[in-house]
Image (spheres, grey):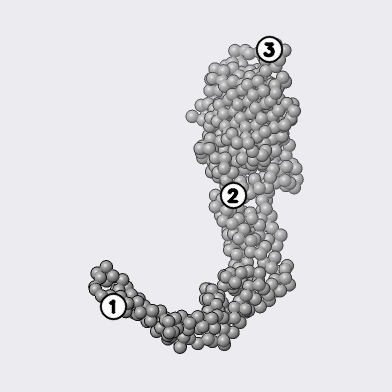
């Protein structure tokens, strides 16, 4: 809901600050006073086209700020969050236009592309005017209104998700089919590579173990020679270590007297003699038992050579081969009869198509029923608006060959026949500006209970009507305001008398400069304005009385 509008140096408005509430707000004033300023400013805040002429003469820039309460507008909250522009429950749209025609856009204080203002603005307001881009002329709006009216938004969302899943698999399948020759070549290569890796059957850590074994086997001669020499030095040579230690002990044992200070040394030499003897025995056993195995060395080297060759072939390190083998096997399984095979993709596509058809067919039935009811109710509203001859038709046309689409199995378009006997045609091609406004009003009244657009703006919906019909228009706008927020520019006192809030637009000249002024009227002010709208310049007692009666009646009707 629009809560505030601030306009600075725009057109003939130097500074305008307006507060808006729920319900119906009427904008009135003499022709040329500047009623369009409010609507044009809102249009700019929603991303409308701007030019240098919008800037007030003598000013550097025009600044327009529109504040909305979006706490109850789920779509707007989701949009703000997805663009990281959310800021509690308020949403502030700002547009700054320089006198050279350049403009900048902001959402909640953050600079943004103009397209963002348009996208978000479309979720917050809908402007119905012959001079404004109207969502009512777009097919997607017609579909949205029908789905809201039918209470089928969730089903429509499920249908769209089903289509997305189907389309994803379809795209994947088409790519596979278009590249069938290339895919087959890739499959053959994968099979060959995996078979090679299967034959190699390399286990994790095996390469490191083989390299250690190769190092030992390749140095067998050196190991035997050195071990044999060590054994000789320990116990077998004439001057072996064990014999030398024994000689040292004998020298100490032949000392003429016992020396306590050498007791530890003698103990250490005794232990050394024992250790050396045991080491010599171990070395002899090792040499006797050690078998140099040239055949095993050849076997290990051939195995390592196969591993290194395979790694070079795939341009990876030998350590990466086991994981590479795992990945290639998984890819082969997927392409060759697995989830990614043509057969499996075709089966999945058919299953997803069946799921989509079930949801879309259900949605089509609900839409068809809702369309008939919507047409009847709009026809009733059009009759009240002095358009009984206008025929309104919600046309559902099936997609070619029932081809799945994100929105279901049909296109939805509002058609009208302005005169009896004439074929129904798209709304944009038939209705004039005034007719379109009234048709739009009739539609909005009917779908008001289900529509998610919180703020509706009508520009001169009363063009070409008067009398009792004008009063009906006022009642319809008021009823819309009871369920949301309606802002309308009107020239009819019958409409103005029924609003919740009345804004009066006037202009004045000061020091050769023209200014626009917008003020909120109290009850007495509203009566005076209704009188002006009734009687023009000359205010008679009769006119005042008539205005008072009309105002009282307009307000009382709704209490």
Q: Which residue is mark 1?
A: 254
In the rendered view, tell whether residue 107 sits above or below residue 511: below
In the rendered image, the vertical position of residue 373 relative to residue 266, given as above or below: above
Q: Residue at x 67, y 36 (%)?
A: 47
Residue lying at the far top of the rendered structure:
511
Q: Are marks 1 and 3 in contact (CB under 8 Å)?
A: no
In terms of depth relative to the viewer, which is nearer, 12 or 358?
Answer: 12
Q: Position of residue 341 (x, y in %)?
A: 63, 72
Depth order, front residue of 114/351: 114
Q: Look at the image and tell me whether residue 29 can be seen.
A: no
Per the model, the C-alpha gap separating discs 1 and 3 is 137 Å
Which residue is situated farthest in the front direction here? 256
Name the residue carrying label 2. 147
The image quadrant of residue 136 is: top right
Tell me the SS state at disc 3: strand
**In this figure, which residue is indicated by the disc labeled 3?**
510
Residue 85 x %, y %:
57, 40
Identify the image quadrant of residue 355: bottom right
Nearer the camera: disc 2 or disc 1: 1
Which mark is first along the chain, 3 or 1? Answer: 1
Specify few, some or many for label 3: CA neighbours under 10 Å numbering under 14, 14-19, or 20 or more.
few
Residue at horizontal 69%, vertical 68%? 176
């Amino acid at each position: 809901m629009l809560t505030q509008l601030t306009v600075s140096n725009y057109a003939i408005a130097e500074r305008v600050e307006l507060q808006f509430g729920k319900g119906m707000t009427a904008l009135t004033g003499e022709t040329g006073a500047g009623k369009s300023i409010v609507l044009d400013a809102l249009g700019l805040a929603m991303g409308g086209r701007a030019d240098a002429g919008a800037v007030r003469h003598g000013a550097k820039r025009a600044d327009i700020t529109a504040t909305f309460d979006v706490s109850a507008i789920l779509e707007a909250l989701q949009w703000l969050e997805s663009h990281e522009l959310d800021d509690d429950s308020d949403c502030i749209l700002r547009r700054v236009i320089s006198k050279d025609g350049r403009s900048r856009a902001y959402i909640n204080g953050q600079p943004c592309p103009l397209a963002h203002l348009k996208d978000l603005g479309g979720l917050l307001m809908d402007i119905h005017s012959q001079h404004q881009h109207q969502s009512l002329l777009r097919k997607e709006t017609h579909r949205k209104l029908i789905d809201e009216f039918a209470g089928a938004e969730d089903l429509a969302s499920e249908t769209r998700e089903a289509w997305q899943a189907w389309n994803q698999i379809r795209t994947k399948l088409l790519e596979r089919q278009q590249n069938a020759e290339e895919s087959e070549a890739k499959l053959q290569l994968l099979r060959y590579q995996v078979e090679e890796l299967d034959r190699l059957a390399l286990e994790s850590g095996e390469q490191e173990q083989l390299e250690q074994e190769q190092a030992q086997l390749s140095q067998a001669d050196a190991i035997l020679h050195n071990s044999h020499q060590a054994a000789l030095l320990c116990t077998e040579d004439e001057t072996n270590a064990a014999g030398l230690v024994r000689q040292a002990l004998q020298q100490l044992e032949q000392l003429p007297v016992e020396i306590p200070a050498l007791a530890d040394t003698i103990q250490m030499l005794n232990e050394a003699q024992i250790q050396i003897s045991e080491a010599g025995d171990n070395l002899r056993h090792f040499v006797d038992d050690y078998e140099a195995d040239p055949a095993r060395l050849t076997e290990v080297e051939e195995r390592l050579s196969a591993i290194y060759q395979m790694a070079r072939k795939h341009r990876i390190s030998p350590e990466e081969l086991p994981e590479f083998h795992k990945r290639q096997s998984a890819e082969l399984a997927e392409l060759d009869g697995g989830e990614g095979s043509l057969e499996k993709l075709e089966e999945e596509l058919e299953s997803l198509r069946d799921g989509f058809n079930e949801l879309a067919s259900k949605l089509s039935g609900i839409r068809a029923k809702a369309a008939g009811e919507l047409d009847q109710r709009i026809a009733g509203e059009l009759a009240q608006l002095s358009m009984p001859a206008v025929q309104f038709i919600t046309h559902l046309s099936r997609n070619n060959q029932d081809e799945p689409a994100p929105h279901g199995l049909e296109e939805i378009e509002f058609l009208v026949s302005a005169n009896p006997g004439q074929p129904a045609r798209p709304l944009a091609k038939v209705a004039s500006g005034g007719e379109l406004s009234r048709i739009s009003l009739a539609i909005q009244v009917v779908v008001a209970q289900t529509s998610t657009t919180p703020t509706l703006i009508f520009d001169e919906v009363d063009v070409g009507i008067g009398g009792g019909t004008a009063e009906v228009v006022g009642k319809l706008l008021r009823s819309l305001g009871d369920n949301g927020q309606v802002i309308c520019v009107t020239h009819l006192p019958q409409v103005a008398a029924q609003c919740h809030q009345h804004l009066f637009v006037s202009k004045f000249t000061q020091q050769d400069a023209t200014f626009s002024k917008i003020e909120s009227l109290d009850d007495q002010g509203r009566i005076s304005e209704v009188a002006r709208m009734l009687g023009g310049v000359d205010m008679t007692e009769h006119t005042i009385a008539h205005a008072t009666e009309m105002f009282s009646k307009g307000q009382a009707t709704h209490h």
